Image (cartoon, grey):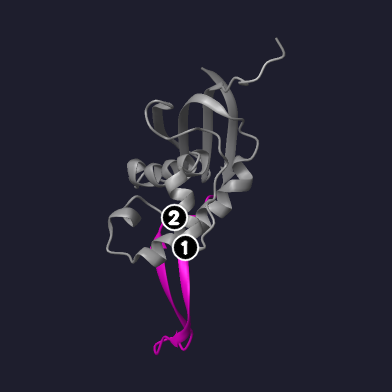
Amino acid sequence: MDLIKEIIILDPPTKYIDRKKTKIDPKTGKLKEDVYYLTANLFYSVLSYFMRYKIVNEIKAYLMPKLVGVPKLEKMRIHLIYYKPQDTFDLDNKGYFWIKMILDLFKTPSNRQIKNANFKGKEIKTLNVLKDDTVRYIDDIRMSYERGPHRMVINIYGVLKKDELTLF
């Protein structure tokens, strides 16, 4: 597969801070805040559906402009290289979170997802790059670490989608 696009994200966010609008921390006198780290643990914790949805939506909004320009693909492979000065973190935890967000943006929503979103009055964030995020369309996901200034490099490899209509 050919390299379709290389995306470089300098200093990607590592946490989401939810500032409470009405709760004051008695120790500091400032508004209380909850900190959520952007790792795979976010999907396995007892975090409320509302807060998870809020975080995921904000991260997708952050990623969308960075991923614009990836063409429609028949099939793809993805390689995420996570750069950080220190080597004391779990690559699978960080990488899984970011890969999940990227692939969710790339996949085309199903009719059921569209109907459900319309019913709830929610917007689906998508770039419609792939028909689905199953192994029929994505057959290789790689993550690697390199020491360096904090950034992510996302290499998208793929087979361009052929136009269904031709002149001949």
- Report the amino acid beneath label 2: Asn
Q: Quadrant of residue 100?
A: top left
Indicate the secondary structure of the residue bearing disc 1: helix
> For the magenta stretch, what is the residue range?
11-37
**Residue at 59% over, 19% down:** 162
In the rendered picture of this protein, how many numbered marks are placed on residues?
2
For label 1, the residue is 120
Q: Is residue 31 above or below residue 12?
A: below
Question: Which SS does the magenta portion mostly show?
Answer: strand
Identify the residue position indicated by label 2 in the image.
Answer: 116
- In this orientation, does residue 84 appear? no
State yes or no: residue 104 in magenta. no
In the displayed structure, would residue 45 be above or below residue 125?
below
Residue drawn at x 49%, y 42% is 102
Q: Quadrant of the C terminus?
A: top right
Residue 161: x percent and y percent? 57, 23
Q: Relative to 138, is 105 on the left or the right?
A: right
